[in-house]
Amino acid sequence: MKNLIYLQLKSSIKALVFSTVVILFVATSCGEDDSELVKEGGDFAISELAGNWEATSAFFSRDSDNVSVDIVADGGSLSLTVQSSGTCTFTVNPVDRDAYTVGGEMFWELYEGEYYFAIEWDDYPGDWASYGATLTDTIFTMNGGPDTGEYDFDNEGTPDSARIGFAFVKI
């Protein structure tokens, strides 16, 4: 009887060790982010954005209730300054409130062989949002899906999560 208990205990310990190794392997191999952050390789080099840009449209929309605003069409403005390193500053100037700035760093996210234009916002270090982006000599556009921007739609002091769509001309 003692030998049977010993063999059962030995088998249980082996099963526990094996299960622990499998769980640790799965936990460390799953969820790894294999993306790489680069300044070149996408549709254009990030350094090509260097300079000052003025928005011809600056669209913010909130999915939860389909509220949207184009601050340029409403009489406000949006400007963008980009350094050759990709450091950027957006100056948002709605017609009905004080202007404010938001900054970050632009780069390309290389993920599974594809490049995605992205910005790591200063207010959210270590996290970034991806956007559709196009660039010609004088026009830059960027469009984001849900939660890629923020805007205080009701002007109560708290920004709401928003989609964005910006079109800029180089000045």
Image (tube, helix red, strand yellow):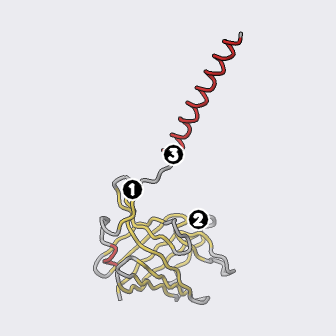
The residue indicated by pointer 1 is: 111
Marks 1 and 2 close (CB-CB < 8 Å): no
Query: Which of disc 2 and disc 1 is earlier in sequence?
Result: 2
Q: Residue 63 carries which label?
A: 2
Q: Position of residue 170 (x, y in %)?
A: 35, 85
Residue 112 location (% of width, % of height): 37, 52
**Is the residue marked by circle 2 packed among few (<14), some (14-19), or many (20+) residues within 10 Å?**
some
Left/right placement of residue 162 relative to residue 43 reads right
Which of label 1 and label 2 is nearer to you?
Answer: 1
Viewer-proximal residue among 112 and 13: 13
Q: How far apart are marks 3 and 2 (CA)?
A: 35 Å
Type of amino acid under label 2: Asp
Callout 3 amino acid: Thr
Q: Which mark is residue 28?
A: 3
Instruction: Choose between 122 and 76: the one closer to the eye.
Output: 122
User: Under tag 2, what secondary structure?
Assistant: loop
